[in-house]
Image: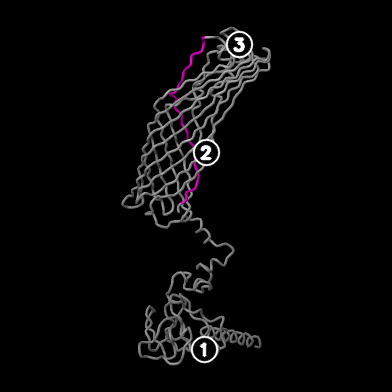
Amino acid sequence: MRIRRSWVLCVLTITAMLIAVHGARAQSYPSYPGEPVPGAYAGIPSSTPPMQPGYGQGAPQYAPQGSYAAPGYVGVASMPPGYAPAGYGPPPGVAYGPAVGPYGQPVGYYQAQGADPQMAPIPATSMGDPAMMNGYGAPEGEWCPSCQGQGCRMCRGAGDFDLNLLQYLLPYGAGGCGAQRWYDVNAEWICLKRDNIGNELVFTTDGLNGAPVLRMSDLDFGHVSGFRTSMAVQLSAGNNIEGGYMGTFNWASMAQAVSNIHNLFSVMSEYGTAPFNGFDETDRAGVHRIEYSSGFDAFELNYRRRWMAPNSRVQGSWMAGARYLYMAEDFKYVTQAPINNGAQMYYQCSTMNSMTGGQLGADLWLCVIPGINVGIDGKAGLFGNRTKQQTHIDATTFTAGPVVEEMSEGTPALLAESNVTFLWRINQNWTLRAGYMFMWMDGLALASDNFNAAPPFVAGQRVVNLHNNTHVFYHGGTAGLEWQW
C-alpha cells in the first residue's frame, strides 16, 4: 500500500513540475515558426501574448486577442491596451496605454516575472538595409534563433569551417555576360614544341657504307618556354589599337655517335666509298656530333573592332594589322678522327629569316557564366621573307683558312596563328587565362636543310645554294594574366 502511494505521489509531482515548466516557458519564450500557438491565440486566456509566424522578418511579434488586427498573421488577432508590436504604431489619434517594451510587453514585464533577461526573445528587426541582415531575421553579429544555428550566415560562421569561404573561389561576375571583352595589358608564359626538324639525312654510318648511327631524326625540338605580351589602347567605343610581342624561345638539340674502334664514316665521303676509306677529317673517326639551335621573335601592331551579339552571351571582333618576325638558326656538324693524326672538321651553317607583312584575323567569345569565358581566335597573313644562309667550314688540313659561303634571297612566306583560350576573372582588375596555341609558317630557310654534304676538301665540289621553301609547325600550352585598369 505504501508503494502504491509512493508511485501516486511521484506521478503527481512530475505532472505538477511539467505544468509549472510549461507555464514558465509560455511566459518567458515566444513561439517559433512551426510550433503550436499557445495561450490566448488558441482561445485560452493567457497573460502572455504569443508570437506568431513572421518573427524576425519585421512583422509584429505578438497578436493577442483584443483590438488590433495584425497584417500577415494567420487568423484575426487584436492588440489589448498596453501592448505595441515592434515596427507598428497605433492608428492616428489612438493611444494604447502605458509604455511598452520591444516585445509588446509593458516595461519591466520580464523582470517582474523573474525571467532571465538573457533568455528573453530577441528583438524583431525591421525590414531595413538588407546588408544588415543575415537572411534569417537576425541582425549581423547576433545568433539567429529561427535556424537554431544551422542555416544563417552568422551561425555558419561560428563553426570550425565556413563553407562561405568557397565564394572567394568563384569568378568575379560584375557586369554579367554583357561585359565587353577587354584588357589593358596581357602577359603569359608559352610552352611551344616544334614538330619539324628538317629533311631526313643520314650523317654517319658504322663502317664502310654500314648501318646508320647518326641521322637528322635523332634531333628533337621538345617543349621550350617563351613569353608573349600585348597592350591595348582604346580609340573609341569598340575600337582599339593593340601592340604585341612574342619570343625568347631557344630550341636546342644535340646527338652524337661514338666508336671506340674509330669506325665512323661520313656523308661527305658517301660513307667511305668516294673516295674509298673517306677523308682524314671526317672518316675512320671516333666521334661524330650534330647540333641544332633555333629561335624567333615577333612584333605586331593591329587595329581591332569589337562587336556583341543581341543576347550579349556571344561577342567577338575582327582585326587588321602588320607583323614582323625574325628567325635565326644554327646547325653544326663536328667530326674527330684521332687515329688520323688528330684530324677534325668543324662545319656550321646559319640561316636568317626576316618576315614582314600584313595580317587579318578575328576572335569569338562565349560567356559560360559571368566571369568565365571561352574563346577562339586566329590570324593569318602573307609576308615577304628576306632569307639568308651563311656557311663556315674549318678543318685541320686547311692551309688557306676556313671556307666561307653566303647567299641571300627574297621569297614570299605565309604565317598563321590560332589560340583556344579560357578566361577566369579573379576580381575587377585581374583575369586568369590559360589555353593552347598553334602556329604554322611556310617559305622558310632552315639551317638543317641548308647543310651541304659536298666535301670541302676537293676543289670544285661545292656549289653555294639556298633552300627557303620549308615549313614548320609549333603548338603548346599558354598561361598568364590580364590586367584591366
Residue beneath the point at 59% across and 7% down:
276
Is disc 2 in contact with disc 3, using a CB cutoff of under 8 Å? no
Q: Nearer the viewer, residue 335 or 260?
A: 335
Disc 1 marks which residue?
A: 109
Residue that carries the numbered disc 3 in the rendered image? 279
Residue where numbered disc 2 is placed: 226
Q: Where the N terminus falls, by quadrant?
A: bottom right
Image coordinates for residue 160, horizontal then vertical, percent? 59, 63
Residue at coordinates 37% horizontally, 54% vertically from top-left?
A: 178
Q: Residue drawn at (64%, 86%), measured in percent from left and top?
A: 6
Q: Nearer the viewer, mark 2 or mark 1?
A: 2
Q: Nearer the viewer, residue 44 or 227?
A: 227
Report crowding for label 2: few under 14, some 14 to 19, many 20 or more residues within 10 A (C-alpha): some
- Secondary structure at badge 2 equals strand
Q: CA distance from mark 2 to mark 3?
A: 42 Å
Q: Residue furthest front?
A: 400
Task: Give the side of residue 264 with respect to residue 404, left or right.
Answer: right
Residue 71 to residue 445: above or below: below
Q: Position of residue 238 (x, y in %)?
A: 35, 49
| Looking at the image, residue 462 lies above or below residue 125 | above
